[in-house]
Structure formats: structure tokens, C-alpha cells
Image (spheres, helix red, strand yellow):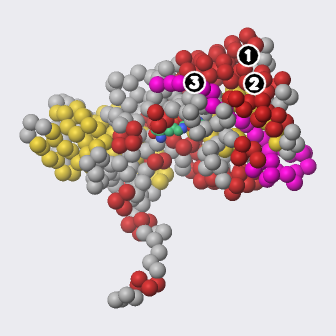
Amino acid sequence: PLSARANESDRLEIGGCDVTMLVERFGSPLYILDEETLRTACRQYRDALTAYYPGESQVLYASKAWSCLAICAIVDREGLGVDVVTGGELYTAIRAGVSPQKIYLHGNNKSRDELKFAIAVGCTIVADNWQDLHHLAELTRDGDGSQPQRLMLRFTPGIECHTHEYIRTGHLDSKFGFDPDDLDAVFEFVKAQGNLKCIGLHAHIGSQIFELQPHRDLAGVLVDWVAKARQCGLPVEELNVGGGLGIRYTEADDPPSIDEWVKLIATSVAEACQARQVALPKLLCEPGRSLVGPACVSAYTVGAIKTIPQIRTYVSVDGGMSDNPRPITYQSSYRAAIANRLSAASDRTVTIAGKHCESGDILIGEALLPEPQPGDILVVMGTGAYNYSMASNYNRVGRPAAVLVRDGEANTILQRETYEDLIRQDRLPERLMRSGV
Ligand code: LLP
């Protein structure tokens, strides 16, 4: 995080709070979210759009990266809208006080209940496929056309990019979005619906992307489609280029800055509009990872250490794949440090293992650290995106707490799950409570 530094005791401090003391106070493991870093990233997106895009613009936070009340409230205060993909994320954004006018519901298989919920709260719905359109047409049938449901259309742009295959979405063989061959048919269908108002088009090509060219290509494709939609008579005012900007997890990563990414997109869209004589749409983007990812560290306590001579040292921590499933899911890499001895020389290469009952539960295969001791506080950097949001209770491990730090103050934003929480949904059928049957 931006506000991280070594304090007088040679310990890591974030947001003016000593990480070791945070762990003493709030327990271990602990997600520590730096408010300043999150707010700064929000402003960088906003300021860059204002600087480089000659038309109106809006940044949405892709809340799948980490959906909770506090984060939705912070991004809302920074003027961002929120992208949600399920009823649960929508509910969270609403309960955090985000205005439905700034909420967009995505999803490749929205249930009728989710659609009804979205219609009732009045957010914009991004139709992903024919089922969405048919359900929406039906669910809004009783309207008199005076308050049409705001609708965006998501298409698969057919753009490849280099990232993990699980998180690529722009190629034609993707479950997301209408096939571009359906463009005309979709436009005609929507035009015929008096209670649906197509206000924009959307595409997203993937996540943790370092290249800029795919987004330049995307801008061109989307502007072509905007021109087409308008020719067809749809009142398309908004163009959403999705998210996807990658972040630095390890020294080897070299992603573009937020400023560079926005500049590339804003100028590509503006140029494409000029070349095709298309009036500038309002430009939206919906980053997730690059907003919250760098703003958080996960703090763990070092426990058992096993050295296999000439082979490896396993340093086990009190969390693992349940609070950070990314290494086991995508073979993703992370950096770590020992928070309570920051300046000690990093002269050991060790393997950071989780506590789960799986050999694959390895958080970091090779971490260069000072020799870890049981009781050390180990921090893993850049864990704000897709960690808490993908966390599980595997092995009946409770989700860690999360604290928000700022100016020396720390507030719990997510409580640690207790044993009682873990069995909250359990039900024991009556007959199993009787003895001997
Ligand atoms: N918009 C749409 C429609 C998306 O599908 C996504 C991410 C985003 C925006 C935000 O993308 P971002 O700026 O965060 O790259 N669990 C995976 C990442 C899945 C991304 C899914 N969609 C991971 O941990 O790497």
C-alpha cells in the first residue's frame, strides 16, 4: 500500500497502524485494507478520464473483486458507481447506500429473481444473452413505456489477450455476451420493446492484462457497434470498455499505470469516434483488481517450520487457500515480508504453506525472507482483489477479519467468522438427535 513504511521499531506500518499490533488486537490471519491507497486509485481513474476523454465519463467499481459494505461506501464517496454480477452483490451495494442510478447488473445467467430485484431497485441491467432479453421483455411487459428499464448490451468482441485462460473473456469462445453475429438481430429485438431502453454497449476482454493493444482494438470494435446501434435507431449513449488492468504481484510484473491505461482507452475511443464521425458516448470503465488489489495485505502468524535438508523449508501460516485461493486456482504469485523485522536481511528462500489439508495449499512457492521464526507476522502483499471475495470455509476454517486503516485508526469492516458462524446454517434432523438410531 501507498502508506506502508517501516516504523521506529523496524516494523511494518500501514495507514499509520503497526501491523504487528493490529494482529495482536484483531487476531490472525487479518486482511488489512489501506483506505488511502484505495481512494487514490479511485481518483487516478477519475482524474485520468477527465483529463483524456473529451466527453462525459464514469468509473464503476467491479465489486466482484471484493464486495462488502465498507468498500462499496468508500468507492461511492469517491464518485464511482458499482458493477455487480449477482443479487448478493447488488444487495450489498444497495445496503451500502450506492444510488441505483450508478449500479449496473452483469451476469451470464441472471435468475428471474435477480432481474426482478434489479428492476425493483431501478439499476441498469446489462443483458448478456437472449434469455436475459426475453425475461426482461416479459418482466417489464406491464409498463406503459413511460419509465423504460435501462438496458445495456454485452457483446463478445473477439479479442484475444495474454492472461490466464480462466480469466480471459474477450475471445469468441466465451460464455459471456452475445455473439457479434447476433448484433443486428439483438438491436432489432430491443428496438421493438417499448419498456426497454438500450442506453449502451459493453464488452470486457479479461483480467490481469498488461498489454495495451487489446484495449485499443476493443475501443475500435465498440465504436463501430455504437455507430451501428445508432443507425438502427437505438438511443445508445454509453460505452463501457470493462476492466482488466493488471497489477504488480511480484517484481517481475510490469503493468501499465492507471493513467496510461485510461489514456490509451480514452484517446482510442475519442479517435475512433472522430474517424467514424460518431458523437462521443459517455465512457465507462469498470476496474476491480487495480482499485482494491494493491490496497490490502494479508497478515498471518508463522507456525510450524519443516526443513527437509537440501530440498526445502516449509513455513506454515495460519491461513491459506481458504482466504487466498488464487495461488492454487491460477498458480498466481505473491510477495511476502516479515512485518516485525523489516530490515533483517532476506537471505532464505522458503515455501509459504497454508494450513489446509492439501499439498497444493502453498501460498508462495519461493519467498525470499529473513529466516522465519514461529510467531513472526508474515504479510502477503496485494491481496485486496479476489481474495476475500473468493474465500471459502474449507476445512471449516472461518474467514479472517478485515480492518480498514487510515491515519493511525483501524476499524473492523468484516468480522472474523467464529465456530458458531461455521455451524450457523447446519441443521441436525430430529431423528439423528435421538440416541441409538
Ligand atoms: N467487468 C467484467 C464484466 C468482468 O467480468 C470483470 C472481471 C471486471 C469488470 C473486473 O476486472 P478486473 O479489473 O478486476 O480485472 N478471480 C479472478 C479474476 C476474475 C475476473 C472476472 N471478471 C482472479 O482472481 O484473478
Question: What's the amino acid at mark 3?
Answer: Ile
Name the element at disc 3: loop
- Residue 55, numbered label: none
- Residue 226, numbered label: 2
**CB under 8 Å between callouts 2 and 3?**
no
First of labels 3, 1 by sequence position: 3
Left or right: 23, with 263 as reference point? left
Dividing the picture into quadrants, the one containing residue 351 is top left
User: Which of labels 3 and 1 is toward the front?
Assistant: 3
Which residue is the extreme one toward the top?
275
Crowdedness of circle 3 by 10 Å Cα count: few (<14), some, many (20+)? some
Q: Residue at x 62, y 44 (%)?
A: 108
Question: What's the amino acid at mark 2?
Answer: Val
Crowdedness of circle 1 by 10 Å Cα count: few (<14), some, many (20+)? many
**CB under 8 Å between callouts 1 and 2?**
yes
In the depicted view, which residue is nearer to us: 232 or 290?
A: 232
Residue 33: x and y in percent read: 44, 42
**Magenta region:** 135-162
Q: Is mark 2 within 8 Å of ligand 1?
A: no
Instruction: Specify whether residue 318 is in view.
Output: no
Characterize the magenta stretch by its predominant secondary structure: loop
Q: Quadrant of the C terminus?
A: bottom left
Quickly name the residue at label 1.
273
Instruction: Specify whether residue 1 is in view.
Output: yes
Residue 292: x and y in percent read: 49, 37
Q: Is residue 208 above or below residue 83?
A: above
Spatial distance from mark 1 to mark 2, Cα to Cα? 9 Å
Question: What's the amino acid at mark 1?
Answer: Cys
Quickly name the residue at label 3.
159
Name the element at disc 1: helix
Q: Residue at x 54, y 17 (%)?
A: 213
In the depicted view, which residue is nearer to us: 47 or 392?
A: 392
